[in-house]
Image (cartoon, rainbow, N blue to C red):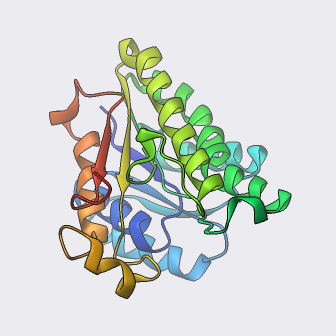
């Protein structure tokens, strides 16, 4: 097993926490960013203090050619790839009838399509390594296909990620590659926390560490036989 990971959207927030946790666990890590070069480089330098190889790479993963180049560069600089965590994804809260064509495409591109582009590019490297872990991020209750009045495009994109991930799980299990989903609920870096916290059963948002713990479990040896699963990190929200 080679320990080489790419985490998209890892300059800050949840992605950064995941990438740093993987560095602590001995993984060489590629931090990905689109615009936040300084933050990504700082995170990469912090990861390197754990004695692993760490790099920061720029790409707009909503564009398939840039997603492909990102994966190729990460594999070249790290000496292979065995883990991908797809954390990139914009959020939109807007009445369904008012969503513009541009906003619709942006939600699908930044969430579903970016996940597809990056993951498809990593699979040949995982097969070459003889081991791979795919962890994609959705959001709490996405697997239940419940309609929302102001999150329609986002919900569709995240539900699509779950279906895509489950399909990969069935296809790739004999290649020793698992594919799973972590679905956060309200997190400490979410907007509108003051209004949301009172309705959360846990009475607090998820920390980025809570979410990273779930991702790292799916990557760990203890999860070798677990694939195609959705783990909600939501403190009982939307059950």
Residue at the image point whose x is 35% and y is 60% from the top: 18
Q: Position of residue 201 (x, y in %)?
A: 20, 67
Q: Residue furthest right?
A: 101
Residue nearer the viewer, 205 or 96: 96
Q: Residue furthest top?
A: 174
Residue at the image point whose x is 48% and y is 24% from the top: 168
Number of marks in picture: 0
Q: Is residue 31 left or right of residue 186?
A: right
Q: Position of residue 225 (x, y in %)?
A: 22, 23
- Decide: is 170 above or below 25: above
- Decide: is 166 above or below 5: above
Q: Is residue 129 left or right of residue 161?
A: left
Quadrant containing the N terminus in the rendered view: top left
Residue nearer the viewer, 120 or 110: 110
In the rendered image, which quarter is residue 193 located in? bottom left
Q: Position of residue 191 (x, y in %)?
A: 47, 80
Residue at the image point whose x is 67% and y is 44% from the top: 113
Q: Is residue 94 left or right of residue 40?
A: right
In the rendered image, which quarter is residue 107 located in? bottom right
Q: Position of residue 186 (x, y in %)?
A: 36, 68
- Decide: is 108 above or below 176: below
Q: Is residue 84 visible?
A: no
Q: Is residue 167 visible?
A: yes
Residue at the image point whose x is 43% and y is 76% from the top: 190
């Amino acid at each position: 097993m080679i320990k080489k990971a790419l985490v998209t959207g890892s300059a800050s927030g949840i992605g950064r926490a995941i990438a740093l946790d993987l560095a602590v666990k001995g993984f060489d890590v590629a931090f990905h960013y689109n615009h936040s070069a300084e933050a990504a480089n700082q995170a990469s330098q912090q990861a390197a203090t754990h004695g692993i190889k760490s790099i920061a790479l720029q790409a707009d993963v909503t564009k398939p050619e840039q997603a492909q180049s990102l994966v190729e560069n990460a594999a070249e600089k790290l000496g292979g790839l065995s883990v991908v965590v797809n954390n990139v994804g914009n959020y939109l809260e807007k009445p369904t009838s008012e969503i513009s064509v541009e906003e619709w495409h942006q939600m699908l591109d930044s969430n579903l399509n970016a996940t597809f582009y990056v993951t498809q590019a990593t699979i040949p490297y995982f097969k070459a390594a003889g081991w791979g872990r795919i962890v994609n991020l959705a959001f709490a209750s996405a697997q239940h296909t419940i309609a929302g009045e102001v999150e329609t495009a986002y919900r569709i994109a995240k539900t699509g990620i779950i279906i895509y991930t489950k399909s990969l799980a069935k296809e790739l299990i004999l290649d020793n590659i698992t594919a799973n989903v972590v679905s956060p609920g309200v997190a400490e870096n979410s907007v509108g926390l003051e209004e949301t916290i009172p309705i959360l059963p846990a009475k607090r948002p998820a920390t980025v560490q809570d979410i990273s713990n779930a991702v790292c479990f799916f990557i760990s040896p203890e999860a070798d036989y677990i694939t195609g699963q959705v783990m909600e990190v939501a403190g009982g929200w939307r059950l």
